[in-house]
């Protein structure tokens, strides 16, 4: 629209309000994405004693191993776990090198193989709400994450009961 001398009339709404509204909407969008990222749920694994005192916790855990030296075979045993739906732990696989008391040689619902002199039980799918471990004096029990190894005897005394429990938290907490 032109005024009486042929100049275009400035539209106050388009010139003042629209740029501020676009700036605000862009800022709101960026802040929303940032909050969604920070407040997105992640799984964690908590290790506590029998009195529910937290001794260790690790965020953003989806898989871990529990390793120990078998009391009879005196060789390393590895149990592989994953956290499922923030509320349960599923044992998927077990690996060991020697036969010993309590170590399986076959299983009905699993897959037993010998691979490179290692006995592997896979597809176990044993589900637990929590895992209770008594810290041993000579078993060298460890929890192995992709980027960290926790030796249980360093966070608790031999004979102490530890409870491993999964959960959900947020990236910022």
Image (tube, rainbow, N blue to C red):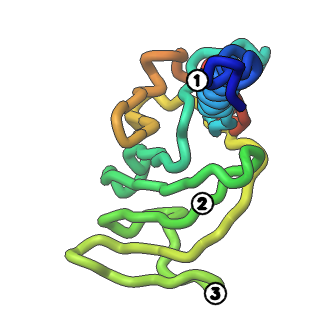
Residue linked to disc 1: 57
Q: Quadrant of the C terminus?
A: top right
The residue tagged with tag 1: helix, strand or loop?
Answer: strand
Of residues 85 and 97, the one drawn nearer to the viewer in this rendering = 85
Determine whether label 2 and label 3 are within 8 Å by CB. no
Of residues 70 and 93, the one drawn nearer to the viewer in this rendering = 93
Comparing labels 2 and 1, the label whose residue is closer to the camera: 1
> Which sits earlier in the primary sequence, circle 2 or circle 1?
1
Return the x and y of residue 122 as percentages of the image width and height.
49, 75
Residue linked to disc 3: 108
What's the mark number on residue 92? none
Quarter residue 3 falls in: top right
Q: Quadrant of the N terminus?
A: top right
Return the x and y of residue 140 as percentages of the image width and height.
38, 34
How far separated are the C-alphas under marks 1 and 3? 34 Å
How far separated are the C-alphas under marks 2 and 1? 19 Å
Comparing labels 2 and 3, the label whose residue is closer to the camera: 2
Return the x and y of residue 30 as percentages of the image width and height.
59, 27
């Amino acid at each position: 629209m032109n005024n009486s001398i042929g100049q275009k009339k400035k539209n106050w709404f388009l010139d003042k309000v629209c740029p501020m509204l676009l700036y605000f909407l862009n800022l709101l969008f960026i802040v929303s994405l940032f909050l969604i990222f920070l407040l997105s749920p992640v799984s964690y694994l908590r290790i506590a004693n029998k009195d529910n005192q937290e001794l260790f916790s690790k965020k953003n855990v989806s898989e871990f191993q529990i390793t120990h030296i078998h009391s009879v075979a005196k060789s390393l045993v590895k149990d592989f776990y994953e956290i499922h739906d923030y509320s349960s732990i599923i044992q998927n696989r077990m690996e060991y090198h020697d036969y010993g008391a309590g170590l399986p040689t076959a299983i009905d619902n699993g897959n037993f193989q010998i691979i490179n002199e290692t006995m592997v039980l896979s597809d176990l799918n044993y589900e637990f709400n929590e895992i209770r471990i008594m810290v041993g004096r000579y078993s060298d029990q460890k929890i192995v994450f992709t980027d960290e190894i926790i030796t249980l005897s360093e966070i608790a005394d031999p004979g102490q009961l530890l409870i491993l429990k999964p959960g959900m938290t947020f990236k910022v907490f």
